[in-house]
Image: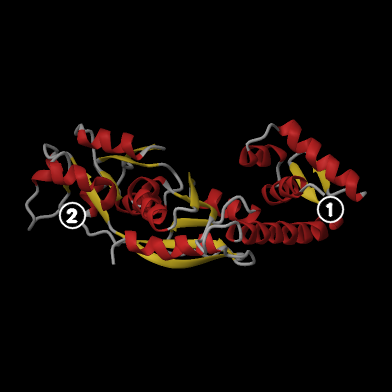
Amino acid sequence: MDTRLLRTFTTVARTGSLTGAAERLHLVQSTVTAQVQTLEKELGLSLFDRLPRGVVLTSAGREVLEQAEAVLEAESRLRAVAASAGGTGGQVTGRVVLAAGETLVSARLPGAVAALRRSHPGIEVDLRTMGTADAVAALRTGELDLALLLEDEASFGDVACTPLAREPLVLVCAPEHPAARRAPDAPIDWAELAREDYFLHEQGCSYSDLFIERLLTAAEGTPPRITRFGSLEVARSCVAAGLGLSLLARANVADALAAGRLTQVPGPRFPDVTVQLARHRRRWLSPAAAALTTELPHHFPH
């Protein structure tokens, strides 16, 4: 049996959508549909009920899903054994698919991947940018081996999360912004902050979402003016131009702070956000993935 059919089936099952599975697998929807139909024909079973709102596993499909995931897990182990036995002189080899939000992908992970490449040249890291919800879904479908989540509380059942580090946050503005001229002994309070303009990371960024909640709580009357972007660079650029403030990971603005393009706003202190290392509880951790998990902590503050 072609394991590609099983991978497509498990992805459809976990996303509950042919379209969603096609996006994750980088296939056209007609190919996903054809592969599911081929698997159903081979097994002589109907695996999904097709409904207007998506697809739902049949009772037979639920049983097949568990076995399909076991087969894919066995395939992963077999490939790792084959790679290790392929004349690499005992070196760890293999491919690891790692996802994280842009905050970490831009500031922390390039250095970690470069260091791993030096110590383990036989390991290939496929780095992807994903928010928490997408990363958890991709761990469940087997699309990812590991993910880093910026979440203080992380409970996802079959996805295990282990605190890895703490990421410092900083509220920043341009040096010429009025907020930058406040005396350290007279910091801006939450009520004043709620009257400023903000340029923040996109919805789903945990620390931005919590910051907005606090601003809305402190606002009296008119809600704060908030613009959210999918790009940290756009948010940084707007703030550097003097258009408003932003709450960002210190690692993402360290160079701009050092160069004087941005400055820290004297105001409330923001707690560091937890970096969680996430992986599927039931899936085998390959030697390559284990090597990456050992390397990652060295690239975060201690």
The percent position of residue 174, horizontal first and vertical second, equals 17, 39
Q: Looking at the picture, how far across and down is residue 160, in whole percent?
A: 55, 66
Colour convention of the picture: secondary structure
What is the number of the mark on residue 267?
Answer: 2
**Count of number-bearing discs:** 2
| Residue 266 visible to the viewer | yes
In the drawing, does residue 183 fall left or right of residue 153? left
Which dot marks residue 192?
Answer: none
Q: Residue 112 or 79: which is nearer the viewer?
A: 79
Q: What label sits on residue 58 in the rendered view?
A: 1
Mark nearer the viewer, 1 or 2: 1
Which quarter of the rendering shows the C terminus? bottom left
Name the secondary structure under disc 2: loop
Callout 1: SS:
loop
Task: Tell me the CA gap for discs 1 and 2.
Answer: 55 Å
The picture places residue 169, in percent across and down from the top left corner, at: 28, 55
Q: Residue at x 82, y 54 (%)?
A: 61
Quadrant of the rendered structure where residue 51 is? top right
Q: Residue at x 65, y 61 (%)?
A: 77
Of marks 1 and 2, which one's residue comes earlier in the chain? 1
Q: Amino acid at mark 2?
A: Gly
Find residue 50 and report its image quarter.
top right
Instruction: Give left or right: position of 25 versus 124.
Output: right
Position of residue 253 in the picture relative to residue 287 (left or right): left
**Side (left or right) of 204 relative to 141:** left
Where is 166 relative to 133, above or below? below
Q: Residue 55's quadrant in the figure?
A: top right
